[in-house]
Amino acid sequence: MKSPNQSLRIRTRLILTFGLSALLITSGISVLTYFLVRGNLIENRNQSALSVASVNARQAERRIFEGATDKAVRDFLSNLRGVRAESTPVLRLETDWISADPVVFAAPDSIDAKLLEVVNTSPLDGAKMKYRMGNGTPVLVIGFPLATRNALYFEATPLDDIEDTLDSLANILMLVSGGVFIFGIALGMWSSRRVLFPVEEVGQTARAIAVGDLSARLDVGNDPDLEMLASTFNQMADTLEKRIEADAKFASNVSHELRSPLTTIMASIEVLNGNAASLDENSKLALDLLNEDLERFKQLVEDLLEISRYDVGANALTLERFLIVEFLERLTEQRSSGAMSINFPFEINDILIEADKRRLARVLSNLLDNADHYAGGATHIEVRADEDTLILSVIDNGPGITQADRSSIFERFARGAEGSRRGSGTGTGLGLSLVTEHVKLHGGSVEVTSANSNGSGSRFTVTLPGVIK
């Protein structure tokens, strides 16, 4: 079972690596920047607020004396707030609380109980605490005990401006991280094209060789890292081309060499066939077997010559226009098994196609022969048209072809599951491979599927694009 990483393409993994690396680095820098700025802002605010609150507390201690009126205290606190408008001074005189701005910071309700307890019991250096008030506003509250009149001095500094600054900073850092991530993806796409271009070139060249272009080669170029790969690949392609050409030449030479003695043997057999009436029963039986095997041998030689021409690229289409329905009717009438039904829509009756008539006839004949040998004969032929594409199907009611054999039966000398039943007159093993070659030369394809829902029967479908005129 493949892991998720193995199922991704190399290019996708490379792009994701660039993007995620950029995102990870930027996120790390952003988080570090955020906490450094946050710590710096809070520390500066703490020191500033503590320094101002300490000075104000000493002033309050000097100004508050026995007999000072509440109005005088309020005026004093208002003056202190005017010096530092963002802070709100609060004073407790014995049991009375006086706030410079009760709307912004009401005393004692806005003072945290724990802080109040600490300031009541703390030495003269006071205490501080950060918390949120009932309305959600974050504040830094600093308190000092005063020696005069059992007083306590508090100063509340709001921190919402720092929160707003940090929120803006966080949004900016997230946007920057997103932008860098997109830049990393773009850089990964550009880099992957540059890095994987040689790999794509290898794939395209290998694909060209696979479809028959044996002359395809890699450009070695000036990259020393790829020079060995390209040179080795080209050497392999040269060896493969020479081997295939040698095999094709061997098959062609053998086939040509066999034709002369085969012609002599066939002529001699004709003489024997002319005197068959004078032969005894055993001799007649031997002659019949010899006729049957020689006919198969003749077909094998012709198939070998035909397929060797494909191997050396000596085949070319001879195109001509003809009526497809009329062509199929004549083809089936000429067969010894007799004419069979041809199913087609009415509009196809007058359709002209442009194709190699001889090769198309060979394709249909081989498919019909295959049905005769293994399925008791074809039941009918179907013809369809899809825009400029012609679709021909040969259907039989035989035992069917297993899924494992459906691709291998088009290989040369492939037997499939029916191979064990092949008799002396059941073909050469090259019929379906020649069908593939003829159809491929037209730019088409051939496939086999089950004809019936229970898996029995076979449907050989030939698709020829761009032939309808």
Image (spheres, helix red, strand yellow):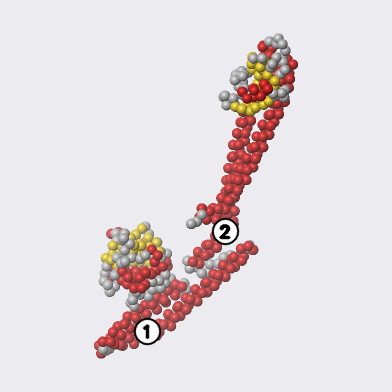
Count neighbours of disc 2 (C-alpha within 10 A) and say few if under 14, some if 14 to 19, many if 20 or more: few
Q: Residue most toward the left? A: 277
Horizontal arrangement in the rendering, residue 201 relative to residue 446 (left or right): right
Helix, strand or loop at mark 2: helix
Residue 233 in which image quadrant: bottom right
Residue 10 visible at all: yes
- The image shows residue 287 at horizontal and vertical percentages of 30, 85
Horizontal arrangement in the rendering, residue 414 relative to residue 47 (left or right): left
| CA–CA distance in space, label 1 to label 2 | 56 Å
**Pick the front one: 272 or 57:** 57
Helix, strand or loop at mark 1: helix
Q: Check the image and report above or below for 293 versus 209.
A: below
Q: According to the image, label 1 marks what residue?
A: 263
**Mark sitting on residue 197:** 2
**Mark sitting on residue 318:** none
- The image shows residue 429 at horizontal and vertical percentages of 38, 73
Residue 318 visible at all: no
- The image shows residue 418 at horizontal and vertical percentages of 35, 70
Please name the residue shown 59% across and 20% down the image. Answer: 109
Residue 176 in which image quadrant: top right
